[in-house]
Structures are given as structure tokens and as C-alpha cells.
Amino acid sequence: MGVKQVVKGNFATAVAAKLARVDVVPAYPITPSTLFPEQISQYVADGEMDAELLLTESEHSAMSAAIGASAAGARVATSTASQGLKLMSEMLFIASGMRLPIVVAVGNRALSAPINIWADHSDTMAERDSGWMQFYAENNQAALDLMLMAFKIAEDHRVMLPAMVGLDAFVLTHTMEGVDVPLQEEVDEFLPPYKPIYTLDPEKPMTFGSFGTPAHYMEFKYRQWEAIKNAREVIDEVFAEFERKFGRKYEKVSEYMTEDAHIIFLTMGSVSGTARAAVDKLRERGIKAGVAKITVFRPFPFERIREVAKKAKVLAVLDRAVSYGFAGPVFGDVSGALANEKERPMLMNFIIGLGGRDITFSDFDEMAGISMKALESGKVEEPVHWINLRKELLERGA
């Protein structure tokens, strides 16, 4: 059943691309995701991977090349982060609109300005409406596994949409962890060769991404809407098959100590492990807390969020990004999911860990305290709270 390797998160996603027998990897390096194309380059040079590594002049060009290769019937993967994902943004919408199952490993990194290379989710959150599926890894094992599953989900003919797998910058991309790497023959059984519905073929000419007039455009968009709805069922099927095959369980939203919890922290990404440990400490002090971790953010797991919310008195949503003038983006989606529920918990939003700032047990103590105060008073005075701000910097005008 495979071998155990101690690897960085970027290496884990590159291993997944190799195991998936990816045909084309268009690449442009950017911190903290550069190790992905470097490792792919090594695999190709050593003859371990039969793939075309295309070194492009920008991230925009990398995604453009990915679109062309995928439209021609190739299995395609690449990696990027932060400003690189932004430079790809125009092409992300085109990839989705053309229904191309490209998979991208994103080293989740803060956006400029000011320039910052550390972890938060502002880059992928800004692309949540691009029509791409979004998966978030808690650790390096999940980074590898979600990459493999992303290909199978994206290439399912009920879906045919691209997917990105987020792994937090440096916390995962550059941290060594033990990872179970499956054998090639096991992956081959789980992930068969890509069979596109349509391909670019000189013998059978057709147009991809053609001009869409008002008479036709809306129906194209509705088909995308249907496809990402279909992905909900396909994700469940693939997660279940992966567990049967490899023994590791994945859920759209997983829970820890939620059955009797008064406060449930809703997390995404690497902070989830810290959250579970913090909940253990809060429980020792008599505070009934729990954790629900989102792994699948797009398509949004409406039903699972509603199930979690029914258990909570306070649902404390942690966001490592902010939608300026509103709140955190995850908080906005959670609020929408619960809008028509007759009974729902108090909703609290905590902006935390931006630009790679450490998220500590004391931060969870603070969030629990704010949540308990709302619970005791019976009302939410202010739903959005920024956690662990350095007041001395604010006073100096930073």
C-alpha cells in the first residue's frame, strides 16, 4: 500500500501530478509554489515522468497554454500563488467556460500591497466566482490526496470543470511531513486515463469558447451552474471510492467534538489542526467548543453547513481573507446558507492570520471569549472581529 515519505507540501502535489500521469505542465515560477515545477522538471529529466514541461513567460501564458493543451485532450496541471493567480485570472474564467478539467496547486499566499509572501486565502477567495472547484488541504497528505481526487472529479463527464487545491504558504508548501505515497498501479486503478468529450482535432474542426451573443450566452452559463451542482454528488462518490481504495477518509465538512458544542469554530486549511488542539484545551476549562473543517469550498457545501449549524449556539467562522466593506468571504457564504433557516445559531466572524500571522491558542481563547459574551448577552453587538491586531502599530499609523 505505497511508501511513507517525508516531503514538503509542494513536493506532495508534484508527486500527485506524476502519479496522475499528467501529460502537460505549463509553468511559471512564483514563491511559494516554485518547487512544484522544479520537481516536475526533475521527474521529466530523469525519465520518471512522460510529460511536456512548458516554461512560459508569465502565469497568464501558463494558463493560456494549459487551456490549449487541455482542449487538445491532454491531462494538464500546474501551480501558482498569490499575484500569479491574479495574473491568471482572465484565463481562469475562460478555462471554466470552456469546461476544461485543468488542476492547479495553489500555495495560498497573501496579495499585495504591501508585498507579502506568507499564508492567507485572499488569492483563491478572490477567484471563488470563476467557476473553478476549490479544495483546501489541512496537511501535506491532504495536498497529495486532494490533487489525485481533483483530477477524477474534474474529468467526470457530469462535471468537466477545472479545480484548484489550496495549501497554505510555507505552513504546508515548505514544511516536511510524513506522507503515504500510493503505488503507481494503485493510482492507475483509481484514476484511469483522461477521456475528453470533445477535443481540438484538425480532422474534425470545431470551435471552443466561441463568440456568445445574448441569444446564447446565458444558457452556456447555466450549463456551468449545472455542472458545479453535479460536482457535489461526484465529490461524494470519489471521496468514498478513495477511502475504500486507500483507507483515508475525506468529507466536504468534517467535525470534531461538535455533538454537545455551544461554540463551533468553522475553519479551512492548516489552522484546523491548531483549532482541534485549542478545543481540547477549552474543554479542559469547561467551555464546550468544537471544530468543523471545510475541505470543499466550491461547490459550497450548503447542506453540511446547515447540519453543523443546527448543533451550535454560536458558529464562529474563521476567515484568512477579507471582503472589504463587508466581512470575511466564508462568513458571507455561511450567512447565505443559513438565511432561510427558521432556527440558526449566532454568527460570528473572525478575521485572523492574514499575511501569515501565527494563529495561536490565545487567539482561540479570545474568540471563545467574544463568542461566550454574545451567548450570555443573547445578541451579537458586532459580528466581525479582527483577531491579534498589533495595536501599537495601528497607533503609529502602520
Image (tube, rainbow, N blue to C red):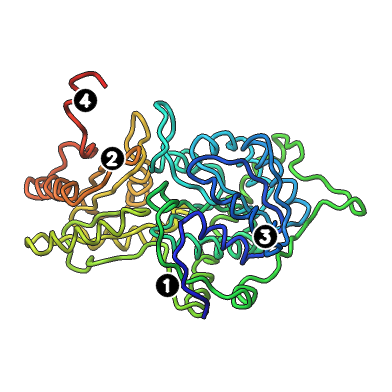
Q: Which mark is residue 351?
A: 2
Query: What's the distance in space between the residues labelled 3 and 1, CA to CA?
Result: 24 Å
Q: Estimate the x, y position of residue 286 in percent, counting from the top left.
A: 7, 62
The residue where tag 4 is placed is 393
Left or right of residue 245: residue 277:
left
Discs 3/1, front: 3
Query: Depth-wise, is mark 4 or mark 1 nearer the camera?
Result: 4
Amino acid tagged 3: Val
Of label 2 and label 1, which has the lower sequence position? Answer: 1
Q: Residue at x 56, y 60 (%)?
A: 150
Indicate which disc, 4 or 3, sits on the residue closer to the N terminus. 3
Where is mark 1, residue-wise? 249
- For the residue marked with disc 4, what is the amino acid? Leu
Q: Position of residue 160 (x, y in %)?
A: 65, 57
Whichever of callouts 2 and 4 sits on the residue coming sooner in the sequence is 2
Asked if residue 4 lies left or right of residue 359, the reply is: right
Mark 2–mark 1 Cα distance, whole angstroms, equals 29 Å
